[in-house]
Image (tube, rainbow, N blue to C red):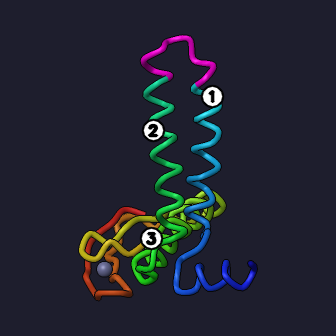
Amino acid sequence: MRYRLQRFFWGRNGFDALANTVMVASLVVMIASGFIPIPILGLFLYMVSFAGLIYSYFRCFSRNLVRRRQENFRFKEFFRVRKLKWKERKSYRYFKCPHCKAWMRVPKGRGEITVTCRACRFRFDKKS
Ligand SMILES: [Zn+2]
């Protein structure tokens, strides 16, 4: 039985951080939707959470590992950058490169400066 399960999951994405988060959020919304006094809103939330559950299973069984890992990476990156921005909000300013959308930071309080993107060498002015 275990062997067959392992073989089934071989080459599939499995539960990653994104799938887990979507699943937990969906279950929470699904339970909460039962307590909403407006029937149409409750039904809507139930359907949204159901779609979320299907999506997390789709991720788990997907064989397109390259795409799924990219999505999972971007998902984790989203929270990592926000956490960093909050932690360093007094000493650094964070913004995206207007050319390649890479995140970068500059020390705060230097006035108008010219920034060069490390990823694509694009130069632009920014107030720090
Ligand atoms: Zn750039």
Q: Position of residue 59 (x, y in %)?
A: 49, 66
Magenta span includes 39: yes
* Amino acid type indicated by mark 3: Glu
At 50% from the left and 42% from the top, the residue drawn is: 50
Count the numbered circles shown: 3
At 56% from the left and 62% from the top, the residue drawn is: 19
Q: Name the residue under label 3.
A: 71
Question: From which residue to which does the magenta span run?
Answer: 34-42
Asked whether the residues under the numbered discs 2 and 3 touch, taking CB atoms below 8 Å apart as contact, a structural biologist would say: no
Secondary structure of residue under mark 1: helix
* Amino acid type indicated by mark 1: Ala
Q: Nearer the viewer, residue 127 or 81?
A: 81
Q: In this view, does 98 lie to the left or right of 55?
A: left
Image quadrant of ligand 1?
bottom left
Q: Where is residue 81 in the image (x, y as percent from the top left)?
A: 54, 66
Q: Name the residue under label 2.
A: 48
Q: Residue furthest top?
A: 37
Q: Name the residue under label 1.
A: 32
* Amino acid type indicated by mark 2: Val
Q: Is residue 82 left or right of residue 113?
A: right
Circle nearer the N terminus (2, 3) = 2
